[in-house]
Image: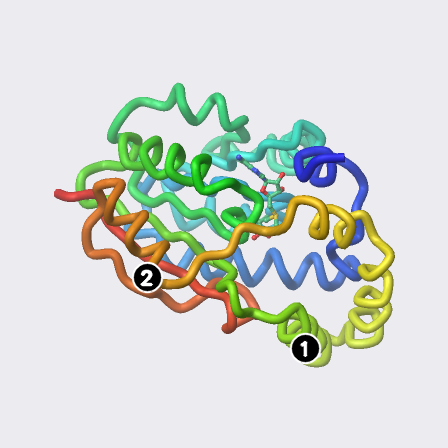
Amino acid sequence: MSWRDFWNGEHAIYVSERHKALHYRRIALDLAALVPSPDAVVLDHGCGEALSADLVASAAGRLILCEAAPNVRDRLRARFGRLSNLAVVSPEEVEALPEASLDLVVANSLLQYLSIDELKQLLGLWLGKLEPGGQLILADVIPPDLSPLTDATELLAFGWRGGFFFAALAGLVRTVFSDYRKLRAQYGLTTYDAATITGLIAGAGYEQVAPHPNFGHNPHRMAFSARKPA
Ligand SMILES: C[S@@+](CC[C@H](N)C(=O)[O-])C[C@H]1O[C@@H](n2cnc3c(N)ncnc32)[C@H](O)[C@@H]1O
């Protein structure tokens, strides 16, 4: 099994339906707050289930959800097909978008599943697709020294605040025996320190590369903002 198979199949990365709903609502609110204007074109790359993408679509002119897993894309289309300003696309279809057509590109909790070469390729792709002055946000980037215990504690705290504490506790125990643990042990997750990721983003041709408050519930993971030169 690869990461791609993992995301395409049934998995228990969200400990309950409530966790999943609260997670995606929070990500959508964080993303919607960055939409620069009501007619902005926004790409959410590696969007996952994006259960609250309608909140982002209502703040933007057009929302493009890019997801590598075909089964997830099917579910997104079933859920959001009625929204005329929302499109669900594959990574290959992002390559076919017109140059300089996006105002905001966000990738949340994606980089850990990509190799450094894949990230470099995507940084170049996004730069071409962004309008001059357009913004890139890379969020939920895992620093090398982040202990899985800290992630677990943040999940429990999110569960406590969100009313799914006991589901979070049970979910953490399940994770120990899960495909996620096995895949993580086999392939690892790609981590970055702040200087390395800043250098990669700037090296790809972006400017104003700066730390940004993270999306979602875990402040120990990092986020970065950058812009295409105007
Ligand atoms: C941890 S989930 C994050 C989902 C969502 N962005 C969030 O923050 O909850 C990672 C998602 O990225 C997708 N993915 C992995 N590699 C991708 C790629 N190269 N292009 C697009 N999506 C990808 C996976 O299928 C999975 O749904």
Regarding mark 1 in the picture, which secondary structure is present there?
helix
Instruction: State left or right for residue 113 relative to residue 105.
Output: right
Q: Position of residue 207 (x, y in %)?
A: 19, 50
Queried on whether the Cβ of the residue with tag 2 lies below 8 angstroms from ligand 1, the answer reads no
Give the total of numbered labels.
2
State the residue position of label 2.
Answer: 195
* Residue beneath the point at 79% across and 46% down: 11
* Residue beneath the point at 53% across and 41% down: 114
Q: Quadrant of the N terminus?
A: top right
- Proximity of marks 2 and 1: CB atoms separated by less than 8 Å: no
Please tell me whether residue 26 is drawn above or below residue 94 in the rendered image.
below
Q: CA distance from mark 2 to mark 1?
A: 26 Å
22 or 172: which is nearer to us? 172
Regarding mark 2 in the picture, which secondary structure is present there?
helix
Q: Residues within 10 Å of mark 2 (few under 14, many from 20)?
A: few
Foreground mark, 2 or 1, reads 2
Q: Residues within 10 Å of mark 1 (few under 14, many from 20)?
A: some
